[in-house]
Image (tube, coloured by chain):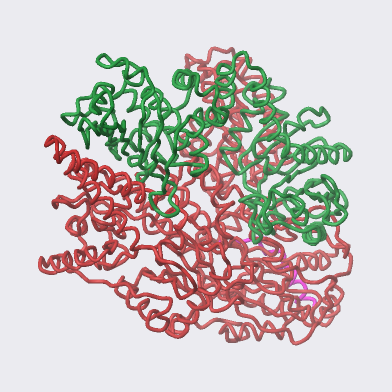
Amino acid sequence: MSDESTERVAVRIPQLALVVLVGPSGAGKSTFARRHFAPTEVISSDVCRGLVSDDTNDQSATKDAFDLLHYLAGKRLARGRLTVVDATNVQKEARRPLVALAKAHHVLPVAVVFDLPVKLCHARNQSRPDRSFGPHVVRQHAAQLRKSIRGLRREGFRHVSVLRSPEQVEAVSLTRQRLWNDKRDLHGPFDIIGDVHGCREELDALLAALGYVKVDGVHRHPEGRQALFLGDLVDRGPDSPGVLARAMAMVRAGTALCVPGNHDVKLLKKLRGKNVRIKHGLAETLAQLEAQPEAFKAEAAEFIDGLVSHLVLDEGKLVVAHAGLKESLQGRASGAVRQFALYGETTGEIDAFGLPVRHDWARSYRGRAMVVYGHTPVPQAEWVNGTICIDTGCVFGGKLTALRYPERELVSVPAATMYYAPVKPLAPAVVARGADVLDLEDVSGKRVVQTRIDRTVTLREENVAAALEVMSRFAVDPRWLIYLPPTMAPSEASEVDGYLEHPREAFAYFRAEGVPEVVCEEKHMGSRAVLIVCRDAKAAAARFRVRDGRRGVIVTRTGRPFFADRAVEDALLARAADAIGKAGLWTSLATDWVCLDAELMPWSAKARELIRTQYAPVGIAGTAGLGDAVASLRAAAARDPSAARLLARYEARLDHVSRYVRAYEAYCWEVRGLDDYVLAPFHLLASEGAVHTDRDHVWHMETLGSLAEHEPRLFRATAHLRVDLSDPSAEAAAVAWWQARVDAGGEGMVVKPRAWLNQGPRGLVQPALKCRGPEYLRIIYGPEYAEPMRLAQLRKRRVQTKRKLARREFALGMEALHRFVEGAPLYRVHECVFGVLALESEPVDPRL
Amino acid sequence: MLLTLTPPRDAAASSPATDLGYLLAKNPARVQSFDLGVGEAHVYYPEATPVRCTAALLLDLDPLALVKRARRQGRHDLLARYVNDRPYVASSFLSVALTRVFRSALAGQSRERPELAAAPQPFEATVTPLPCRGGEAFLRRLFEPLGYVVDAERVAPAAPYFRVTLRAEVRLADLLAHLYVLVPVLDDEKHYWVGSDEVDKLLAKGGAWLEAHPLREEIARRYLKRQGRLVREALARLTAGDDSADDTAGDAEEETLEKPLSLNQQRYGAVLAVLKSAGVSRVVDLGCGEGKLLRVLRGEPTFTRLVGVDVSPRALEVAARRLRLDDLPSSQRERLALMHGALTYVDARLAGFDAACLVEVIEHVDPPRLPDLAHVVFGAAAPRLVVVTPPNVEHTVRDERHAAGAHRHRDHRFEWTRAELRAWAEDVATRYGYGVRFAPIGPDDPEVGPPTQMAIFERAADGGAS
């Protein structure tokens, strides 16, 4: 900074920094902070004093005020927000905790020093009624400040700007500089290449496989893709100089980016003449470099020296580092960040092979950025919580792997030979080392889940706690649970005489929401079942990472195993898989798994206990009690006319109960073998690479209908009818269709907008409404609900809470499927499924 | 629900059968209805001739009102379900109706026919449908000692309801009192909360006949919804002066409690001994349930921190109550705590303990989830010592209470033999760097082993795998 001039005074600070203002009281720090920073970026000690004591000058509150200041600063830095500390900070002891705080959060501490004339400061203080202290205070501050200035860098401040006059302060032009690792503006697409270790031949083959061509000695991609080397270009392999030369040329030409690996850095040290131990393959590199001109070595050293230990790319969605990087270090700058990026995190222990024991940081990784890294050779590149190690041990005879971003495709070329014998066997696979175990943090406390088809869904803490017991004690392995179905709301209470539910209200709802066409689907009276069916157990293990050797599961709407008997479930899954194969769906959907939403019949298969202990006794007791009452009332009425009214009433009650018995008995049949189970799938929810919400319900009906053709023993097609809501005759036909079904003992129907997702005037439209038949409703509302007085009472029911719940659960279920299909980590899928279960513990009228 | 009362009369009877109307204070000429709050009771006479007269009490309960009432009371049982048998069966609602509708008859009073009310008469009563928990045998054991000839038929095959006819020469007041007490006893259910005033009701209606009834304990137990304190109070008051009955009741209760407790106590004792000999001070009880093990451990000053973890919020509430957590001084609160958590999720709060106990826990976890549990306990929490005690399925054959092939507990997802435990434990130990040894809990049968097995894991070297 030049001396006192009125020219612009340039002050540069990193975008993420802890900015410490240093200067006596009255130096104009607060004014400066107001001018150059957002109000929320500045934490003032005076304000903190006020917050804890109601008096911004209460010196007795200093300790509490600074505790608060450090706490607030810590919270902001943890969240990656630039923070300005507005306090005098003239004493070393006052600055020390701030430097420590910056270090703890891996941000750069920056000092802006106000070395202004004492008189000026004092005069300013005089003019402020709240600063009554004498001139000695400022004098003392100034003295402490002057003692400090020269030592600031030694204290740890990475940038120090000293302002020496009010004019200079006035002239400051402050710019925020991006950190070296901040490449958020680069969006790729990238081809990220794992540890090459001097395997030049394989690198050339991989680049060719990725589509790069050599033009003027530099590999370029015709579509402008960029390669991204994850470091460890050198050591152990046959041609480290060749690999270096390629990477250097590409980086220079802008066709590649590169982060350093620990081997590269060690080579740099050696090239710079430092004393390093020649082991782990460095000897080979040095020997190979012997043949290279000095200029190349110098250039290589320059190249490695210029590499930034990690890069944050594509708006923060991608982070690359040689050994990976945990979330709290991403986009930060400190020695510890570099250390982690180069070497990973070690536990401080040494294993049986003499190598440091590595901490499996990816296992607890919950960051939103994808982290791609190398460093630890693995047999197969596998995703763990949104991170992937693509060092597949080429130099040890494995393969050289690249990850295409954002496509998430892996491209590998095999090693020509084993160039170097590994000291220890490769790390075990993800499932074997339990790297995808869920954390309680993933499912506890109040949760806010972002869904793509609707608003965020907030889950209350007590609902979440209630779901934990169900999920951990009764549900199947969460790896299987990629979806739970939403609850379904009924139509509003009907105004049609004698009906609690009627299609008229359902059609009216969708019409009001602007839905042009609906599909009416026969509602089967069984139990909701969600099926995962895989082509075989191997496909299941690969895609779902399960360890139970199964090829699928059938679960209830709360994620429990549908069948107590595994053998039955497995046999049904085998039948289902067979039918899916015969219907050609594996091929046409290019998948080896599907997720089906279905109704499994008979009702008695799942509800046997409920029927035995609850539904049947009501029928039996009702029939017997009311039957005897009717008989005795008949006798009474024969001699006492006043009993006639009561007799009529009891005859009606008896009739209600017999209808109730007929209603539930229709849904029960004895299951003697596999052939007695009937499965009616109505949603083909997802398969590899696709959530089938872009297909309308007619497609779902027809596609799933083909399963019934191929396996009529198990599958039943669902009768359905399309209704144009602008055509009254179509609507009348649909009502007749429904009436005929419920008269024949059917449960009713489900009305869905033809398209899966519909936005209405009030946001997301209900995915479906049910219209249950009057007889079926006896099972729900009690045998005698249709008695006119009671029906009138029941008409007051409110469906809004249920609909809100249905909408939120639907959004969560769809979100879970999308995340699974995209290859999101287990915890991200589980969060949504868990959310559905949590919402199910909301108290709603169970009869809706 | 229908109750009929018929005093059979022969032609030579001194009074006409229709005198029943005076006894009940209900005119045979017309139907009369009474409001019960959740419905009505109707009284009418299917027959009313001088030779034969039958009075009928018909309960007309409103199913919707019943459910509404139950849900308002915060009940979650059968009564609170929208489809339930309550509107149709004889239950405690009948008792309520009897006191409302036949108040004077129940008190043995009759303005017009006091002599008839005071004397035993031949009566025939029918109740349909009467739920009989305990079946026809129990029904007979209740009524036959009171002098009734019992005729019972199930209303439908295998249904728990009976059409019951009772015949006896009995005072009408006594007949009604018998029904008042014994119908809810047979039903084994009450539509209202049972408090101490219920003891008064029982003694008022039970009086002398209950004291002499061979099943008085069971009647009191069921009538008072098995609330031990109330049952003891009722029996004490009922048999005041008759010491023996009270004592035997107490002993019987002790005995039923004693038997399962002893194995539990041995189990806790064994775990405590292992923990003490290992010299651990910070212990977490994983799957602490209602806190029984913690109650044993808290008495040992060597443990400086005790934490119970369970997945059931309800169990934790009970544990907190039993351990009186709310009343602890603050120093003790640091020492003893409960946490809600699940063993299939990694939990950072479980780190830093010297020892973890899984007492009767792992058999409640589905086998496919065991690898996750092992990771959570041995991989992530990784205490120096882990004690696991599952039951030994081989020993089940020695226990006559359990049918062959059935699990000891409904919620057991599996039960292991000694070899199966060994295989699992050794695999886990190898995988996570622990050594494991085994010890029996309970009598070690030479053929089938002990009832409970114990696997004791100790981390091979401090700072081992993580």
- Asked whether, in this view, residue B346 is left or right of residue A588, the answer is right
| B434 and B404: which is toward the camera | B404
The residue lying at 22 percent from left, 33 percent from top is B45
| Residue A313 in picture, x, y percent from top left | 55, 62
Dividing the picture into quadrants, the one containing residue B109 is top left
| Residue A843 in picture, x, y percent from top left | 40, 42
Let me know if residue A307 is in the magenta part. Answer: yes
| Residue A710 in picture, x, y percent from top left | 41, 84
- From this viewpoint, which residue is outermost toward the front? B12
| B204 and A194: which is toward the camera | B204
Dividing the picture into quadrants, the one containing residue A149 is top right
In this orientation, does residue A725 appear?
A: yes
Spot the red chain and give its letter. A
Spot the green chain and give its letter. B
The residue lying at 29 percent from left, 74 percent from top is A698
| Most common secondary structure along the magenta stretch | helix
The residue lying at 41 percent from left, 47 percent from top is B153
